[in-house]
Each structure stands twice: as structure tokens, then as C-alpha cells.
Amino acid sequence: MSAPASPFHDLDHYVALPRVAGLALSPDGSRLVTTVATLNRKGTGYATALWELDPTGQRPAHRITRSSTGEAGAAFGIDGALYFTSSRPDPEGEEDEPVTALWHIPAQGGEARVVLSRAGGITKVVCAERADRVVVTGGLLPGASSEEEHATLRTRRKDASVDAILHSGYPIRYWDHDLGPDVPHVFAVQRGPGPRPGDDDETGDEGEVRPPLPGTTDRAPEMHLKLLTGGTFPATQDPTPVLAPDGTFALLPVTIPEARASRRDGIARVDLATGERRTLVDVEGLEASPGPVSPDGTRAVVVAGRTTSPTEPPQPRLHLMDTATGELTPLAPDWELWASPVAWLPDASAVLVLADSDGRRPVFRVDVPSGEVTQLTHDDAAWSDLVLSPDGTTAYGVRSSYLFPPEVVRLDLASGDVTPLPGPVERPTVPGRLEEVETTTADGTRVRAWLALPHDRPDSPDGHPLLLWVHGGPLSSWNAWTWRWNPWLMTARGYAVLLPDPALSTGYGQDFIQRGWGAWGDAPYTDLMAITDAVEARDDIDSSRTAVMGGSFGGYMANWIAGHTDRFKAVVTHASLWGLDAFGSTTDAAYYWQREMTPEMSGQHSPHLYVDQIVSPMLVIHGDKDYRVPIGEGLRLWYELLSRSGRPAEADGSTVHRFLYFPHENHWILAPQHAKVWYAVVLAFLAEHVLGEEPDALPEVLGLVAPEEATRTT
């Protein structure tokens, strides 16, 4: 069998492409570590490994960990030791079941060893920049005042086969997982084997280094935990500590409960020696999240903005926060882009931030005294995971675009020069080219998009068939490589793919978001139709062969479009909102939805009200474990399509519509074998209704076609 023209021509090759994410830099700036996810032997999941890159770009990358379960969360200690989390078996341990533990590799190299393991595992590890301070996060069962009690309670629940959870607050689930009964906490990692019988102080003095136990001199340093936090933290996820460079305190996000099951986010400070906690930012009507702490520890760059309402969208802005008092001072208050602060320069003269901007996500420098903003990168890419060299002259980051997946690069902060580093993964060759397109709407607004086109000439004199893809969010942008919605799998089969940023997209200023706020069916819809009209007018596009596809908010828009025009030959709607009357109280964050739309707005913009106008064939896709857009939305859409649409099921029960259901997937289809099913079914549906090919009712990847009868559709 000959090799495919590119990995995008074959789904088996595509899902097997290695994937780079994350970045950590050693304190002396000499070592970079990233993670690479690769397909497991069964092809049913991915395992991550840590790889080291040379910041100078002279030496090739090399792998430093290897296991079937994988490793993640790399962080460097002040001594250059590398910490990470993994659930791989401890060769010197006696665990009854796998648990995510804290592992350690000395600065001089050697074998990775477990230094900390606890019931329920460890979720994150964070190290101070200029101090011997390691902090981890993990869950603690209610009623447990120590690690021993926590472990005992977990064992009791397991032995009794109890998984029920009694809630007294909201929310109770988040995206794809149930919340509780563990409550997120933050722990300081203490050196030594932990409290011993007869100790007066259960945790030992801060900084104490106990002598190793007999027979442990060849092991990694023994460590134990000191509980730092109790009280209210974000119920949806473990808090991510932001450590002061000297390791004396951490800033943490906190959840502030409000009446009627609502909540908002504030900021707390925790002393890492004593565990003393003070809430610094708790302002009614304000949401705030912590960011990096200044080199002298007196200030932090945080993001703060108003809570939303049906008439006011979010307006997050950069602020300087006094780390002693919590006082907030606007930083670059007139800059409209939604920025994420990353790092202070060593002299505290400026901070580096990332922000969506015009279909990209560049690196910016914000001068602290003046608030002046300077864009440092000008490539057509989205940056993430930015880390700063100790001398402040160089930054390293992970960047991607629609032309290449994430890769590690070096950025010269003075010149803006970007240099790709020798990495663990080569760029795959994409089967097409990328153009930027735009149009002006009836109200005079500029709307832009990326257009992915095949390299080959159209197989029809009328041009390429066109797929309009609508992004989710809706407060987001088509600006970075995506594995879940990858346009090159479509261009490999002759389609052009349009990736527009309509009203509500980030990176175009506050007014652009305001245009669509509370009115999803208005400006976002007309923007999408306007940019589609402009692209369909091109000589290389066949306007008679088009389809629309979207997921989450994009799925909502696909449903809305289906009920308002018959111009599209097919509609693919994934994890989509259908009946806004019911969705608002069943999503995992109902309090947010109640702030976003009034009942009148929901009624005016609910796609289900226009089901009788739908005549285009629809492929409905939903995962049962989706808590953001619950499965009830897909079930209701499916029934109403067959019973009430303008193209209902026939008298014999047959229908042009299809429902692809994943019992164990969530808002995203993550398992590799199911990603193949997703793409294969979508491609077969489009081939039938857009290209006019014979229907393929049972793609081989569903596993229901006898080998001797199978015809590959991938």
C-alpha cells in the first residue's frame, strides 16, 4: 500500500500525529522542557512524555521520560531539579491502585523518583522562581483535617462502593466531570519524611531539612505536605497558585458566593510559611483573576472587569494590584484587547502579555509606568505558554497557526526576531494554502476570516465546494491550530474551508463584541452570511455546493442558519444549543447564562422556534457526558427534526437527517478512535449531500462492516 500524500489524506495517519503542548524553563535559562502526546499502542488514547529542548537551538531535542501512562505538569525547582506529575507505577512503592504522584529528576540527571504520593493524587505543581518553594494542589474530602483522615475516608467510600455526592451549593458539575466530593486545596511541599510520633509541631518548622531515614540515601529527597488553604476556592477546578518570586506568598483565585446560586471570582493571598489567608479582591459587580507577581513582590498584574449582564458583555482589563492591600490601578485602560498577563521583565519596567488580535494571538509588551502597549510579534500565529529568560532579553513560547501545529520558538524581545528551535516533532505538510479574506457588512463593519484552499485545481469548472465553519465560544477566535476541527482534512478532499470571526469574536475591540451581545441571531448571523457571500463570489468557489458546520456556539449558529436559509446543502451541528428556554437552567454554569440573557432574549433567539423552516439535511452530533451543552439539547433537536421540521421523517420512518451519538464522550470528542468516527461520518454526510455521491450509510470506522465488505471512507 502506497503512503498517503499527507497525514491529512488518511485518518489513521492524522490521529497518530504527535502533539506538542506546554513549556517550562529552568531558573538559569539553560533548559527548556515541553510535553509531547503520542498515540498509544491500542490507538485508543494519548500518552504524554517530557522532552528537553536546547534554548540556544544548537542541539536536537531529546526525550527525558518514558511510560505508558505519561507525564505532565513540568516545573523546575530553584536548584534545577525537574518536578512533574505522573500516574505511572512507583518501582519502589506499594500502591494498590495507580495514583497521580509528584516525581523528581535531579538537576544533574538520573532516574526519576517519586517524592510525594497521596490518596486522590496531585493535580498541579508550581515552583517559586527564586526560592526553594514547591506548591501542589489536590482534593481533600470534607470532614478530613489531615492527610490520614482523607485517605481513610476515601478507602471507606471505595470499599462501600459509594459514589453519591451530597451538595449544598452550586455548581455540581463542570464541562465533562462531576464535582466533589473532594474539595480543591493548596499544599506546601515540605522537605523531610513528615511528622513523626512525639513531634510538637505536626508539620515541622518551615525550611527544616530532616535527615533521611536509614537506607534512603540513594533516593530522591523525601517530602511531605502542609495544608495551606481551606475555605472557598473555585468549585469547578483546582486553584492555580501564582507564587511570589521569593516564595513567601501565593495569589489564588477564590469563589465568592452570591444570592440565587450565583458566584463571582476574587483574589486571595496565602502566606506560604504560616498558611494565613487574606482576601484581597472582593468587590461586588467585579470579576478578578490573579496574574504574575513583580520581582520585588509588591505588585501583581491581574485581570479584572465587570460581571456580565444582558446588556453588558465582559470587559476584562489589565490592572496593577498592591499585593498587601489589594488596591487596583488600571494598566493600559484604553487598550481594548482582552489580554492575559504572562511575566514581568526583571527590572519591573514592563510586563509581557498575550491577546487575541485580528485573527492572531501576538505577544505584547506593556510599559508599567505609562501603560504604553507595543506589539512584539507580527507573524500570522497564536502564541501560548510564554516563558522569560532570567536576563529578560529572550522569551520562549509555543506558537501555532492554521499552517502548522504548536511548536516551540525563541523570541528576541529587542528585535522581535522569532527562531524555531529544534523540536521533537516535525511540521506536517498541509495539503493546501491559506488566504485572509474580509468583507464589509451592511452596517459598515469589517468582518474577516481565514480561507483554507486545496493546492489542486477544482475538480469542477465552477470551483471548490465550500464549508462554512463557525467557531464556538462565542467569545473566541479562529486563530490557532486545532486538532478537533482541522480544515486540512477537508482540503485534502477538495473542499475550501471558510473560518470567519463574526460579531462576538475576540480580537476586534469591545464594540465588535457588543454588536452580538444578547442577540446571537442578529449580527453574528448577518456577519456570517456577508462573509460567505463575499467568498462565494470568487471564481474558485462553487456557490451551489456549500455546507455549514459548527460546534457549541458554532452549533447554535448552524441550527439558527438552518432555520433561516436553505442556501446550504448540508448542516453539521455538534454539541449545539437548540432550545434556549431549557438550556439556561441545565448547563453546568446556569448562573452565568442568567446574567447573559433575559427570558425575552432567549425566546427571541432560540433556534427551536424555527424548526418548521429547516429543509437542509442535518447531521446532529452529541456526547452524553457533555455538561456544558447537556445531551438533552441534542435529543430534543433530533426529535423535533424528525417530527416538526420542514423535512420530517417519511411515513416509513426514513430520513435524510442523521444523529451521531457518543455515549462516553463529552463536549469534545477526545478518544482517537472516536475522532476518526467523527471525521469519517462527517465526510460521508458531506459527500452525499454536497458532492452528490452515493450515500455511505455505514462508514467502516464504526466497526460494523465485515472486513471483506469494507470500503475505506477515510
Image (cartoon, rainbow, N blue to C red):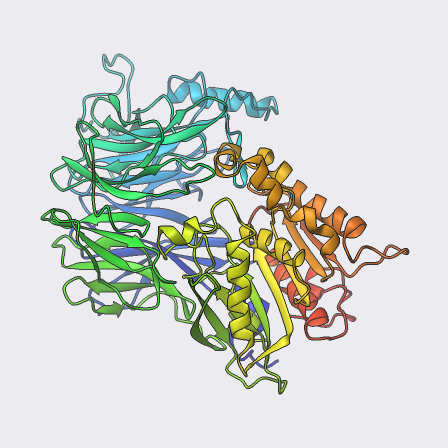
Residue 34 percent across, percent down from the top left: 33, 56
Q: Of all residues shown, which one is farthest toward the front?
A: 443
Residue 559 percent across, percent down from the top left: 64, 54
Residue 188 percent across, percent down from the top left: 27, 30
Q: Quadrant of the N terminus?
A: bottom right
Which residue is at the front of the view, 326 or 431? 326
Q: Quadrant of residue 256?
A: top left
Q: Is residue 445 above or below residue 122?
A: below
Q: Quadrant of residue 633?
A: top right
Q: Is residue 684 above or below residue 651?
A: below
Residue 589 percent across, percent down from the top left: 51, 35
> In the image, 256: left or right of 597?
left
Q: Is residue 674 above or below residue 288?
A: below
Q: Quadrant of the C terminus?
A: bottom right
Q: Is residue 490 above or below residue 552?
A: below
Q: Would residue 625 be seen by someone viewing this image from the given angle?
A: no
> In the image, 93: left or right of 616?
left
Q: Quadrant of residue 438?
A: bottom left
Which residue is at the front of the view, 55 or 354? 354
Which residue is at the front of the view, 194 or 426? 426
Which residue is at the front of the view, 36 or 320? 320
Q: Would residue 170 be seen by someone viewing this image from the given angle?
A: yes
Q: Count the numbered circles shown.
A: 0
Residue at position x 30%, y 36% from top?
A: 241
> In the image, 581: left or right of 283?
right
Q: Of all residues shown, which one is farthest toward the left?
A: 347
